[in-house]
Image (cartoon, grey):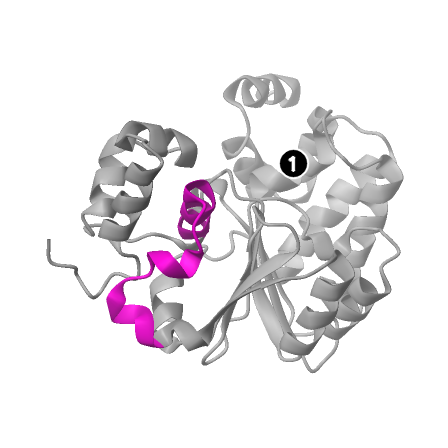
Amino acid sequence: MEIDQEYAHNGMKIARARRKRKWSMEELGQQLGCSPSTIKRIEANTTHLDLYTFLLLAKKLTVDPRYLLNDGFMDDLPSISFLKFPDADHLETFLIGEEKGGRVAIFNKFPSSIYYNNNSAARERRLKNLSSYDARNTEYYPVTAIIEFGFSICSQFSKKEKLSILEKILMIFSDHGTGHLYNQLNIIDSSMLQMPQGSTECEFIPNTDVFMVSAPMYSHSILIIRSLMLVKEFGKIQARNKGLFYTSRSSRFLSILRDCISEDKSIHEFAKSLMNENRRFLDVFLKNINKDISDEIKEYLHI
């Protein structure tokens, strides 16, 4: 089978690794959360892989991610580093140096782990760097993740932790905080986020020749690509419609959430606050939640 050199992954190597584990296409698809027909296209090199799926595939097949690269990209191997660190502090310290110019971060969850409260000096230094005027910090979050953060009964955060996290974010992106025009906060429609729902966090530094992504399925690891060809290939993970709300409106949306959490308001009362502030806030909110809950809120608001 002739390999299409435009694709970063090598389908024959993937098929070989799958057969070595004695998995059918259906069994591998179950591991990745996709159909057997998708696996068939991957192995036939007739579809592209996003970076998260590429890393997850290597994890499930227990092979080095670099092994799955197409031969046409082998010359780029010196430009690819898969680094593992002994703990989170060492990873954060490494990122401080790499993120001096800023980052573009796209998430399936809210918030980025950089805002967690864990008394990490390295993380605080990293956050300070991304808050500075020398860095360009852009973050994308899906509406659904923000709502789950605020109101899910399964949240990992206490009320106090939620308020502390929101204050940190608002300080960076609010016009009244340390935020400036280089810091962009975008809240996006969850259906427009071009990442698998199983992924947790991906952080990118798309400078002219650097592309970085944290690998959530590996502990304290990061994949670094310093190749324009591979950056272009893996850059397909993106927020296609950019922000539904940009910095000022996103900050206002989070401010309303903070106030509702502080006052122990229900999700119904949160919806009412959104409606009073901006009807578009409410429309986007209702579009991105469970239909049954949406119908309940519409009845509650008499709309």
Name of the residue lying farthest toward the front: 20
- Residue 83 lies, with reference to residue 14, above or below; the image says below
Quarter containing the C terminus? top right
- Residue 270 lies, with reference to residue 202, above or below; the image says above
Q: Tag 1, which secondary structure?
A: helix
Q: Main secondary structure of the magenta part?
A: helix
* Callout 1 amino acid: Ile
Q: Name the residue at 38% across, 77% down.
A: 228
Relative depth, front residue between 97 and 218: 218
Mark 1, other Cα within 10 Å: few <14 / some 14–19 / many ≥20 = some
Q: Position of residue 179 (x, y in %)?
A: 73, 70
Query: Left or right: where does residue 118 sit relative to residue 105?
Result: right
Q: Position of residue 13 (x, y in %)?
A: 28, 52
Magenta-tinted stretch: 52-75
Corner quadrant of residue 249? bottom right
Q: Position of residue 70 (x, y in %)?
A: 27, 62
Relative depth, front residue between 236 and 190: 236
Look at the image and say whether residue 71 sits in the magenta stretch.
Answer: yes
Q: Name the residue at 61% across, 40% down.
A: 145
Query: Left or right: where does residue 176 sit relative to residue 3?
Result: right
Relative depth, front residue between 41 and 296: 41
Corner quadrant of residue 102? bottom right
Residue, disc 1: 147
Look at the image and say whether residue 154 sits in the magenta stretch.
Answer: no
Q: Name the residue at 36% across, 36% down.
A: 21
Q: Is any atom of residue 61 visible in this view?
A: yes
Q: Position of residue 124 (x, y in %)?
A: 82, 65
